[in-house]
Image (spheres, rainbow, N blue to C red):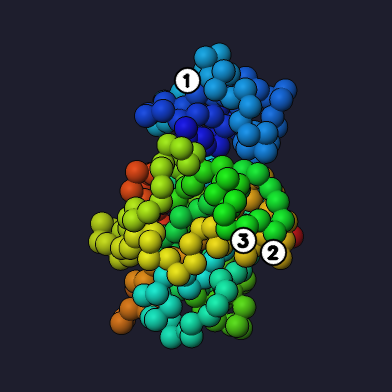
């Protein structure tokens, strides 16, 4: 199944996506589940049955929101494809490189990714997002995939000069409306094994990243094992699993996203996440 969070008529809800239709299951189950994260935590109990009573909307009439707008945590894996590791000049490591993204830095499918007024070095990072279904601590590799509720496309938009201010990635990874997440999450039974599924990032139609998931240095079970060793994973948490080589910062000359551009993250069998690039026009204080 495919699930998404959305706005319709100014009302926030979530539902089941089938083709160009979304069934507003969130409205039917509003007394049971506050949001998609709550439904994930309950293992989607009763969700399929509620579909028959749900209103159906054309997906062209809704506003897509980040799949899980309010995760307890977003853990991002850096330098997880060999080509990307080599282009950055980083040494090989024995454990995943992890940094955090805040939930209010996210944006949805077809919404603009915003280039902040303090930088022009906005870079693309097409990635696979892993949504945790069953929480836990010290999860073994053997059990890891049973903790996965679904997968989605993610664009870990990075403001590179702020990322380079120190050795820590956090500032450059948390500007508002830079982490695109969507359009939906797909359950593992529908997507099937990740295997050698292809991920591509396209900037204005030009392929800028192209890889398969079997090229990851640390696979999804290892990421879940490692992350759950230092924090308790909660239902609705998101692990953003790393980007392939080809990022704009490592090209000669660098290739930055600019206002008016179209950026797409395309994951085979899963979905295509599309965003235009907008520009922050004024600062907000307070």
What is the residue that sits farthest to the left in this orientation?
Answer: 206
- Tell which circle, 1 or 2, labels the residue nearer the N-terminal end: 1
Query: Which residue does the image show at 37% across and 29% down from the upper left?
Result: 19
Residue 97 horizontal side relative to residue 269, left or right: right
Residue 123 horizontal side relative to residue 145, left or right: left
Query: Which residue does the image show at 65% across and 44% down from the upper left?
Result: 134
Query: Percent x, y for residue 197?
Result: 34, 53
- Residue 225: which disc? 3
- How many residues crowd mark 3 within 10 Å: few (<14), some (14–19), many (20+)? many
Whole-angstrom CA distance, mark 1 to mark 2, is 42 Å
In front of the other: 10 or 130: 130
- Residue 229: which disc? 2
Q: Secondary structure at mark 1?
A: strand
Q: Secondary structure at mark 3?
A: helix
Query: Percent x, y for residue 267?
Result: 36, 51
Q: Secondary structure at mark 2?
A: helix
Disc 2 and disc 3 in contact, CB within 8 angstroms: yes
What is the residue that sits farthest to the front in this orientation?
Answer: 142
Residue tagged 1: 56
- Residue 257: which disc? none
Asked if residue 50 is positioned above or below residue 7 in the image, the reply reads above
């Amino acid at each position: 199944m495919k699930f998404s969070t959305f706005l319709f008529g100014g009302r926030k809800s979530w539902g089941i996506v089938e083709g160009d239709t979304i069934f507003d299951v969130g409205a039917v189950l509003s007394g049971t589940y506050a949001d998609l994260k709550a439904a994930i935590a309950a293992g989607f109990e009763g969700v399929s049955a509620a579909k028959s009573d749900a209103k159906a909307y054309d997906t062209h009439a809704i506003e897509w929101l980040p799949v899980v707008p309010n995760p307890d945590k977003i853990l991002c894996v850096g330098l997880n494809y060999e080509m990307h590791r080599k282009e950055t000049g980083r040494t090989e490591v024995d454990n995943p490189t992890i940094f955090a993204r805040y939930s209010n830095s996210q944006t949805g499918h077809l919404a603009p990714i915003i280039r902040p007024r303090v930088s022009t070095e906005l870079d693309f990072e097409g990635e696979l997002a892993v949504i945790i279904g069953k929480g836990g601590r010290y999860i073994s590799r053997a059990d890891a995939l049973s903790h996965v509720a679904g997968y989605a496309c993610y664009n870990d938009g990075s403001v590179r000069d702020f990322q380079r201010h120190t050795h820590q990635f956090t500032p450059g990874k948390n500007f508002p409306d830079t982490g695109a997440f969507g359009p939906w999450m797909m359950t593992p039974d529908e997507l099937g094994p990740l295997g050698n599924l292809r991920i591509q990032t396209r900037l204005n139609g030009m392929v800028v990243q192209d890889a398969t998931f079997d090229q990851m240095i640390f696979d999804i079970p290892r990421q879940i094992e490692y992350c759950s060793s230092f924090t308790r994973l909660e239902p609705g948490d998101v692990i953003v699993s790393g980007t392939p080589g080809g990022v704009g910062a490592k090209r000669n000359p660098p290739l930055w996203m600019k206002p008016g551009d179209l950026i797409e993250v395309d994951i085979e069998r899963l979905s295509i996440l599309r965003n235009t690039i907008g520009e922050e026009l004024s600062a907000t204080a307070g």
